Amino acid sequence: MKKQLTGPFAQLLTMSDLPERGALKDEQLAIISNAGILSTDGRVVEVGDFENLRTNHAGNDLHVQEISVPMVAMPGFVDAHTHLLYGGSRARDFALRNAGSSYLEIAEAGGGIKDSVRATRAASDEELITSTLTRLDALARLGTTTCEIKTGYGLSVTEELRMIKAINEVKRQSRVGVIPTCLAAHVVPPGYQGSNADYLTELREKLLANIIPYTNRIDIFIEESTFPVAVARPYLAAARSMGFQLAVHADQFTTGGSALAVELGAASADHLEASGEAEIALLAQSDTVAVALPGASLGLGMQFTPARKLLDAGACLAIASDFNPGSAPMGDLLTQASILATYEKLSNAEVLAGITVRAARALRKKELGYLAAGTKADFIGFATNDYREITYQQGRLRPAKTWIDGTEY
Ligand code: NIG
Ligand code: FE
């Protein structure tokens, strides 16, 4: 098997051996100087001193990619929460919000998510797949090597099935790792004749068994105006008993969702802008990863997730882009995470772990988000010799190179 050695990197942040949860100091980061990454078959074999690796593994089967400019390497970003598959645009909502309407008011008047549902349903499979691949390619150039993608703009049994299949087709065609999630319980569908509970019953009876080949993850938007806790509980419990991993859109405007996420052992509770002391304490004592979505706070002009308090209480904090046409159209994870750092006083280590190894934890993926023997050889290089430039430049410093499965993207 051919081995690939990439380096030397001025600094390599492996993001390995960090505590899974709680506050982090920059001094806890494992940094290797003059580092090399040795991989084979898309997996890391060894990380360490570049010259040592070159000497120890010299031979015909070693291919060396020499990096001639000073570069800092780190694992590729894991974006653990996106709604990348959609049709249309919500530029109108953006203007309406800035003229005084709220996100929930626009939604209740038939705009918002329902607007995206209309445009997504009207788009062909090919249009949806192509536009999602284009967005994914742009994200890869910004450093994302794994991207979770949710359905949620189909909102009927037939359309949600079409969406999850389309996301699987995107996964097949892209070199970026794609993790599909079913968010059929996003809002009650436009024109739906029954109640929110009736809609979830229909999903349970007619959709969940059929999506097993396409996803092992179920998400729901828990909110008093969409699916309140009491309505969401039986749906999530049923999904869990079928073996699905759970994620929850929780505490964005009102609380309740995070407690249910913890109660049901969800992999993650995402948003949490409205979480208070009680919710923070619950999350901190659980294995449910708290996912901050600064892109949604920036998109809607609302408060950030209490990331500092979550970390200080001992929670595992991930940071994701929430890339979607409504609340978070920017989609730039590094910029958003760096901005969150300034408002929430996060260390570089907390930010970088939040978009790599801790984000992988939110997806329950043990082989992603850090670089050590056996992990996926996904890494990015920034043209600098000081890793602190990455967050300090708030997104202006872009990765100069991205490697997926050990080879350049
Ligand atoms: O995570 N809050 C609900 N869902 C998405 C927004 C989707 C949309 O507005 O289209 C979110 O912010
Ligand atoms: Fe979301």
Image: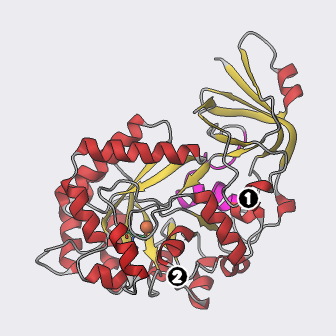
Instruction: Give me the residue at 55% from left, 44% from top.
Output: 140
In this view, the residue farthest toward the bottom is 277
Relative placement, left or right, of 156 versus 380 is left
Q: Which mark is residue 302?
A: 2
Q: Is residue 213 visible?
A: no
Q: Secondary structure at mark 1?
A: loop
* Magenta stretch in the rendered image: 352-372
Q: Is residue 53 left or right of residue 173?
A: right
**Corner quadrant of residue 55:** top right
- The quadrant of the picture occupied by the C terminus is top right
Q: Which mark is residue 103?
A: none
342 relative to 144, above or below: below
In percent of width and height, residue 236 lies at 35, 71
135 and 178: which one is in front? 135
Left or right: 37 in relation to 202: right
Q: Residues within 10 Å of mark 1 (few under 14, many from 20)?
A: some
Q: Is residue 380 above or below residue 113?
A: above
- Image spot of residue 346 (x, y percent): 74, 71
The residue depicted at 33 percent of the width and 78 percent of the height is 232
Locate residue 390: give its quadrant.
bottom right
Question: Counting other residues with Cα less than 10 Å from the Cα at mark 2, is it few (<14), some (14-19), or many (20 or more)?
Answer: some
Task: List x then y, in percent, for residue 258.
Answer: 49, 79
Residue at the image point whose x is 58% and y is 89% from the top = 276
